[in-house]
Image (cartoon, grey):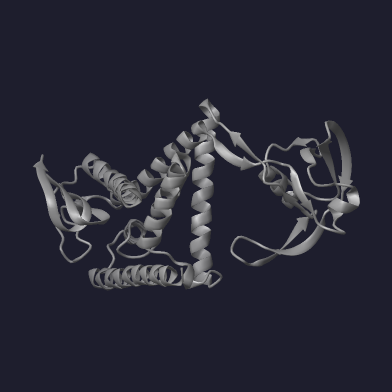
Amino acid sequence: MGFITSLLVLSLLVFFHELGHFLVARYFGVKVETFSVGFGNKIFKKHYKGTEYCISSIPLGGYVKMKGQDDLDPKKESFDSDSYNSKTPLQKIGILLAGPFANFIVAFFLFIIIGFLGVQKTAPVIGQVVENSPAQNAGLIANDKILAINGAKIEFWMDLSSYIKESYGSLLFTIERDGKVTNLKVSPKVNETKNIFGESVKRRLVGIAPSNQSITKNYYGLDAISFGFTQTIESSKMIFLGVIKLIEGVISPTEVGGVISIFQVTSKASEVGIVALLSLTALISVNLGVLNLLPIPALDGGHIIFNLYEFITRKKASMKIVYKLTILGWIILLALMVLGVYNDINRLISG
């Protein structure tokens, strides 16, 4: 069941990505010759209004084949009025952006649904106080519930961490202890710690850790829309930053996962519950959007760069250079796919 769920999630996200390209291409009058979910041999196909809709045998992607555009052979061009090549650079950029944008839209709506169903967040209750820390010196103890800092309401533990990180000077903690509310002055110290990428960073710390208590937060109406927008933006920034850290060598190439990892994690999320599955689906959708915008030839981002060059210089990029860069792009993509599968197999072997 987990495998089928994973397959459905990946296929649906690819479908919406390609649907974005399809709709905007048709809007600009480009003939779409093929709309395929999956690669390889076509196991189902139907012709409708000049387009062949099909499901192919390898359900690990998909594509929209537009007249005059062929990633496998960039030299094939057509300048008929209904071809991709006859459109202006801005129109072609619009078509290219539509796929990733569709993934962001899908994630946005998924996050809205998640907010409506309820999000589990860590409660602002202290679980542990580090010895000789600013928190202990100020009198904070385990099970204290933090209500506010300098008068700013603290609803979740994340609010607490963010406020301390961005603060200056001493902080006035308003806490609840044994049903009584009191104020304690805490003076954070700058210490070295690790960020989510394992890098050493200096940060203001008070020396407390959260308890295992959690709060379910539901978002409705405008709050749900705001939650969906914020989560989509933050997820996009985190994935983009992760790519940067990978290029810089901060994240090891061994951390790159492939399709096996996607299927494993999606399968586990489906067993946990609907919120976990929707959350992971939203993250994968954002991931598809961000990665497709990378300036790698053969990806949407690479084609956008070529069209930006044409828009700025008023002349097309050399077809010889485009062809060579596209081949290079495919080599990079295939290498990343092989690396991901290799790492997945190593993780399976090591347990």
The reply, left or right, for residue 61 in relation to residue 100 is left
Quarter of the figure with residue 346:
bottom left
Does residue 94 show up? no
User: For the point 82% across and 38% down, which residue is it?
Assistant: 175
* Front in this rendered view, residue 77 or 196: 196
x, y percent for residue 259: 35, 61
User: For the point 52% across and 32% down, which residue is it?
Assistant: 224
The reply, left or right, for residue 10 in relation to residue 249 is left
Residue 72 vertical position relative to residue 227 in the rendered view, above or below: below
User: For the point 18% across and 54% down, which residue is it?
Assistant: 56
Q: How many marks?
A: 0
* Front in this rendered view, residue 318 or 197: 197
* Front in this rendered view, residue 331 or 197: 197
User: For the point 55% across and 38% down, which residue is it?
Assistant: 119
The reply, left or right, for residue 340 in relation to residue 202 is left
Quarter of the figure with residue 178:
top right
Does residue 257 show up? yes
Residue 93 vertical position relative to residue 151 in the rendered view, above or below: below
* Front in this rendered view, residue 316 or 349: 349
x, y percent for residue 33: 14, 50
x, y percent for residue 20: 30, 44
x, y percent for residue 67: 15, 53
